[in-house]
Image: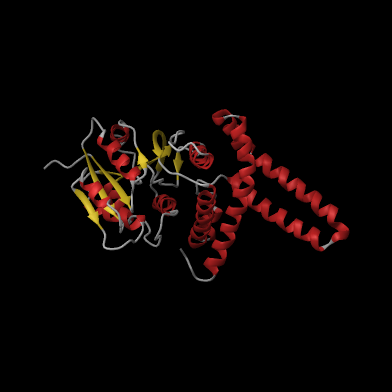
Amino acid sequence: MIPPEISVIIPVKNGGPSFEKCLLAVRSTQGVSYQVVVVDDGSIDNTVEIASKYTTDVIKLPHSAGPANARNTGAQVANGNILFFIDSDIIIPPDTLLKIKRIFEDPGVVAITGVLSDTVCYKNFCSQYKNLWMRYTYTRLPEVVSLFYTSGAAIRREIFLESGGFDTGYRRPSVEDTAFGQKLDVMGYKVFLRTDISVEHVKYYSSFALLKTDFYRSSDLVKMTLRNGMRRFLQGNKTSVPSTTIVSIALFISTFIMIMMGVLFPPIRTCFFGLCSMTIVAMLFLNSDWLFWLRFQKGWWFSLRSLFFLFMIIPAVTLGVCFGIIDYVRGRRY
């Protein structure tokens, strides 16, 4: 039996309606032979029944161990020479797999990662904001990245197996894809960023959900950085987080300290509050490209709302960083 050219690996837990949309989108593929491997990570709904309507390669894990473990499990049973990882709430265009097939006809290509499209079905502000932020940050990265963004990323199967796969220390959706991209970088393999591989993320965010996501993501990123060690850190920013955001976090911490100093030392309060104003202006300047980009994408009103929302996200991310450092020092490495 001739093996498929591409194996599409989808980890899922309680997929819901977006999961069936994901499978329908994969089924619309043309021009390439493919296999769909669904790994159920301990769902308690009808996810397995939905998956079974679209593929015979459905693996039901006895208990939830996280998407990293589920992807590794799927890779072990996949037959394709190319593994294409997507999440269960991702919609791929019909020509996606054909594009991937053609990209990998170049023997020098080992792995690629795609980007999110600029459209999302949910029209509320937070869902639009998060989706556009992910697109903005990724489309400004260089051609070769130390990332493997599993909303849509592909790799040669033999290289994936050689690498040992994703770090199963991550027991929930986190930065396991970033960690895997950095592993490939250390091994000497290049991951190419392909903006022509663009997928839709069917993900709804409320304000609380977005802030919670960014809090935990920043916590996990700082833990990953600490695990990798100082030498890796000094090699430069190896994540999708813009350097302007990292500086903004430092400025926010400085602003908080100066406010507290102003409260504690009234005679020189004006000096501290003046410095505080300067750091706020600096944060606005650092994020001005993002805000102006939003103005062209969604208009002035969306950009203005984003400006105010930014001053909710930066504190949440900063708290996540501090929480991650404290958690790491206490012995929790993931």
- Please tell me which residue is depicted at 41% across the width and 45% down the height of the picture: 149
Using the image, determine if residue 33 lies above or below residue 209.
above
- Please tell me which residue is depicted at 53% across the width and 66% down the height of the picture: 327
Of residues 170 and 201, the one nearer the viewer is: 201
Furthest-right residue in view?
267
Residue 275, image x and y in percent?
A: 78, 50
Answer left or right for 265 relative to 133.
right
Answer left or right for 25 relative to 150.
left
Using the image, determine if residue 221 lies above or below residue 87.
below
- Please tell me which residue is depicted at 22% across the width and 51% down the height of the picture: 58
Instruction: Evaluate whether residue 161 shows in this view.
Output: yes
In terms of image quadrants, where is residue 4?
Answer: top left
Furthest-bottom residue in view?
330
Of residues 55 and 334, the one nearer the viewer is: 55
Residue 139, image x and y in percent?
A: 49, 36
Instruction: Evaluate whether residue 85 shows in this view.
Output: no
